[in-house]
């Protein structure tokens, strides 16, 4: 297949490029480098089946030659308000990538009669009343809250994808991506995995807000990419959760990181932060992915962290 | 003020034009006539303070001269799947009006440093768990359902409006419009008010699905326009519900129509229709409008119907 990946220079986009090239496909990468980074694709320079177009997906997309699939992965995605790459600090770009970018990506898929995959997110579930979240859950999102620039953009993107499927007959897929980690995450992304690894590598105290009993579930990037690749090859038009349902509390997670990195600095406990909603307290119900894609994550947290740490060591 | 109204040839847009002209303002109307109709504005032909631009708001908007306010009212809005003007039959246009149209309307407001009012809807509440709905309620919407083409487009439009307010400092307003009726609704709009009036005028049986105990609340268009005008003059950036909280059940409503039109044909009772969700079972909590705008509806249902009926008589 010849596949366009928007957001190709991002954390997930660049791993997708690698996987699709390894499977023998031809990949056209697209990015405007608002949050993506050229170095994530540097190793593909000169690859015979890889080409790159620097372009902002909120403008009309033109790709010379035919396309068999379009994967729309372009968007700021960090929920951290303290990171310059957090979507709340790139509000208009985030909304344009979600609405105009999805519209243009669907347009190019339609022009070439190509498959389309939308990178959606667990954030469309907002601050959920149910745990874990099934795909049939409609979510609980504040349409005028600070985080709505991302949540509502992705909900709109899902609705537009379904509209193109229903009314233009486009062969679409929607993947709802849960918390994922791995090499090529930004050290300054602001999420807990890079934060803890950075602190531990610098032999600083890992910072915990509250008593550390709050839980997270983390998916290693290779598992995620496997799920997305299976979805691409499937016939599933309904949204599919891809993520790791294994929950770990933050205290336990901090201890795992310190043990792996031999950081003996005591943890720094701070009072709980009160926000509009805690962005990452979500856990996927992956029954649909198991049933339809025969997929489930296989990389353990410790194994995933061992694969991730060298990247951060190099970055520091 | 010089005011741009998108969707000016629609039911609500045309009434807004009339009111703003009556208040001495200058009005620039804009419409592409997908659901709006030239005859709604025919009486303004030659008006010294009215001009019109035929344009699709999903393309870049240019208005010569300055603007003091932009009111974005362009969108298909009928929830009826059996009407050719129902948004489920205009899915892509509806999503473009909500996302691209709002983006372009905010763009022209920003260019002229003009106030901006978004016409939002009670449909952002979806299939609500609470009655009546306050503005603080986040709603319950299926992002991939058939109706999401409207609901998610309007939720996105609200989020984008708030983003322009927060990050570009635009002086924005959001009105959440509940079920409204009056002259210039389409006879074939598919909603219950035109349906019943048409049936009664033709001395046909009024059709009721279920036992008629389901309730609706209807706001007469003059009341709605008064609320929107007060919102325009206010400083309220938060969403404001404008609608009539008075509930009436469908059976009672049918009898009112038949009495007003002296139609003695018995009612036609059919089994309940099962849809994804009943679109109109919503009732506004108007405490915010009362408090901030000192507004509440003043036109009784019977009075409003008496003002509406002659329009439908003429249309038939």
Image: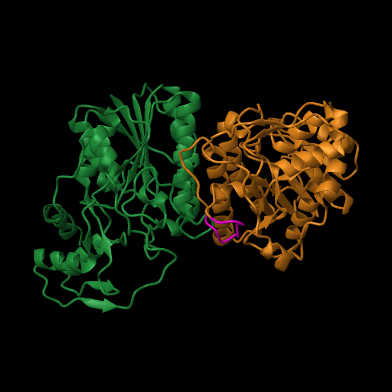
Chain colours: A green, B orange
Q: Is residue B133 magenta?
A: yes
Image quadrant holding the C terminus of chain B, namely: top right
| Residue A46 appearing in the image | no
Q: Which residues are magenta?
A: B130-138
Count the marks: 0
Residue A170's image quarter?
top left
| Residue B172 appearing in the image | yes
Residue visible at 48% across and 53% down in the picture: A149
Q: Main secondary structure of the magenta part?
A: loop
Residue visible at 45% across and 59% down in the picture: A88
Look at the picture and state if A132 lies above or below A254.
Answer: above
Residue A15's image quarter?
top left
Is residue B272 shown left or right of residue A222? Answer: right
Measured as percent of width and height from the top left, residue B283 is found at 65, 53
Residue visible at 70% across and 42% down in the picture: B250
Look at the picture and state if B304 lies above or below B132.
Answer: above
- Which is more toward the observer, B226 or B193? B193
Measured as percent of width and height from the top left, residue A41 is found at 26, 42
Q: Is residue B164 magenta?
A: no
Measured as percent of width and height from the top left, residue B230 is found at 77, 60
Look at the picture and state if B264 lies above or below B50.
Answer: above
Image quadrant holding the N terminus of chain B, namely: bottom right
Is residue B112 shown left or right of residue A183? Answer: right
Measured as percent of width and height from the top left, residue B210 is found at 62, 36
Is residue A81 shown left or right of residue A225? Answer: right
Residue B101's image quarter?
top right
Is residue B178 shown left or right of residue A184? Answer: right
């Amino acid at each position: 297949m010849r596949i366009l990946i928007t957001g190709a220079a991002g954390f997930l986009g660049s791993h997708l490029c690698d996987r699709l090239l390894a499977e023998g496909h031809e990949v056209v990468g697209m990015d405007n480098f608002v949050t993506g980074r050229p170095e994530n694709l540097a190793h593909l320079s000169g690859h015979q089946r890889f080409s790159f177009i620097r372009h902002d997906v909120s403008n009309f997309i033109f790709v010379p030659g035919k396309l068999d699939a379009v994967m729309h992965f372009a968007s700021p995605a960090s929920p951290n308000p303290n990171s310059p790459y957090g979507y709340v600090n790139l509000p208009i770009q985030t909304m344009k990538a979600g609405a105009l970018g999805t519209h243009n990506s669907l347009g190019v898929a339609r022009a070439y009669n190509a498959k389309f995959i939308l990178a959606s997110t667990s954030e469309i579930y907002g601050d959920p009343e149910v745990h874990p979240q099934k795909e049939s859950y409609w979510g609980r999102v504040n349409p005028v809250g600070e985080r709505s620039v991302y949540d509502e953009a992705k909900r709109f993107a899902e609705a537009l994808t379904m509209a193109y499927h229903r009314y233009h007959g486009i062969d679409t897929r929607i993947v709802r991506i849960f918390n994922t980690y791995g090499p090529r995450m930004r050290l300054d992304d602001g999420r807990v995995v890079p934060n803890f690894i950075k602190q531990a590598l610098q032999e600083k105290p890992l910072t915990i807000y509250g008593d550390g009993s709050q839980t997270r579930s983390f998916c290693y990037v290779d598992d995620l990419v496997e799920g997305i690749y299976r979805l691409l090859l499937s016939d599933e038009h309904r949204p599919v959760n891809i993520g790791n349902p294994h929950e770990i509390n933050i205290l336990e997670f901090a201890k795992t990181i310190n043990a792996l990195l031999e950081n003996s600095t005591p943890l720094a406990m701070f009072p709980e932060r009160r926000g509009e909603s805690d962005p990452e307290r979500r856990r996927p119900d992956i029954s649909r992915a198991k049933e339809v894609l025969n997929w489930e994550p296989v990389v353990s947290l410790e194994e995933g962290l061992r694969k991730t740490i060298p990247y951060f060591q190099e970055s520091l």
